[in-house]
Amino acid sequence: MMTRVVRGTASETSSPGQGGRPIGVFDSGVGGLTVLHELLVRLPREDFVYLGDTARFPYGERAPREIERFAAEIAEELLARGAKLLVVACNSATAAALPSLSRRMMQTTLGLDVLGVVRPEALQAVASTRSGRIGLLATPTTVSSRAYEQAVHTVDPHVTLHAVACPDLAAVIQAGEQFDERALATVREACRPLQDAGVDTVILGCTHYPLISPMLQRMLGPQVTLVSSGAALARQVEHALSTRELRNPRTEGEGEGEYRFLCTGDVEAFRELGTRFLQMPLGEVEHVELAAVEAVA
Ligand code: DGL
């Protein structure tokens, strides 16, 4: 009997020998380090290069066109540094810019794939809900993009998404005030509409929110499932590397891969904040100036 092997387009665009290149990860700042943390745990043999656009943080109330341009600039930098795959570890950037960035990267000679945080969370949330009522906490840009509605409804059109835009929450968490009264009041206000709607699953639609998940869980109640992107996205990245034959050839005996950091703002501030978000030592952080891009596809 003959077996015909059908290969997808992504395998055709990757060539052998690219596995040793790093995975490029980016965010508006340090929040994406909560996602990188999961990638480091799940994919210990891979190398990573992380870029935090700290000079332009926050993205959460910016116009989608502006974020598309920022994402394109960052992607060009990571491409120049040899990235074999791009991970958008930022919900606002995924929501606003993933389609345009994917188109742009597919046009490069390598046909680079781009993975974002919205889809893995949407899949997880639909799988978890029993009532069909899902809550979303995210930045205003992410909520108004309706990217989560689209992603959730692609999986199950009968599910209802109750989205709450939280303009200040990421900044409050980033300022290190996640345990003070102001933070408590901000979180309580964000949770109220979700409690009123009787959701049984809540998507943490911003990279900063996993840092306050104990507080959220306490306010929403133990019966509510909190969904964050890190672990599910890491599984998706692992799958993408395998199917595209892009896994790092490093063996167990050769130890763990390397990770390094770039940021557009102050290097010391990144290092100080970053350790709290990554929960691992940070090491070298390099300042980078991004080149302006011609046009966004
Ligand atoms: N990484 C951003 C996000 O997930 C943090 C918030 C912001 O930049 O406004 O949306």
Image: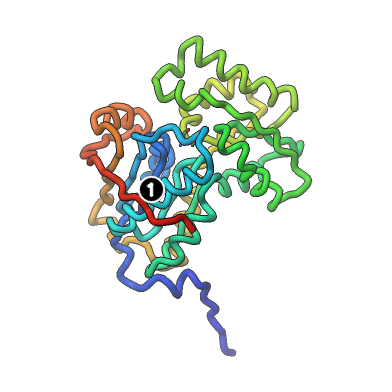
Q: Position of residue 79 (x, y in %)?
A: 33, 58
Q: Position of residue 11 (x, y in %)?
A: 45, 72
Task: Examine the rendered structure and indicate whether residue 155 appears above or below residue 63.
Answer: below
Q: Position of residue 108 (x, y in %)?
A: 40, 66
Q: Position of residue 230 (x, y in %)?
A: 48, 42
**Residue at the image position 50 percent from the left and 54 percent from the top:** 236
Residue type indicated by callout 1: Val
**Is residue 100 toward the left or the right of residue 75 in the image?**
right
Q: Is residue 232 visible?
A: no
Q: Residue furthest front?
A: 294
Q: Which residue is mark 1?
A: 25
Q: Is residue 10 visible?
A: yes
**Residue at the image position 44 percent from the left and 32 percent from the top:** 58
Q: What SS does tag 1 mark? A: strand
| Closest to the observer, 209 or 235 | 209
Task: Examine the rendered structure and indicate whether residue 113 appears above or below residue 205.
Answer: below
**Residue at the image position 51 percent from the left and 24 percent from the top:** 169
Q: Residue furthest top?
A: 181
> Picture quarter containing residue 173?
top left
**Residue at the image position 34 percent from the left and 73 percent from the top:** 16
- Is ligand 1 less than 8 Å from the beta carbon at label 1? no
**Is residue 64 toward the left or the right of residue 268 in the image?**
right
- Mark 1 Cα-neighbour bin, 10 Å: few <14, some 14–19, many ≥20: many
Task: Examine the rendered structure and indicate whether residue 161 appears above or below residue 111.
Answer: above
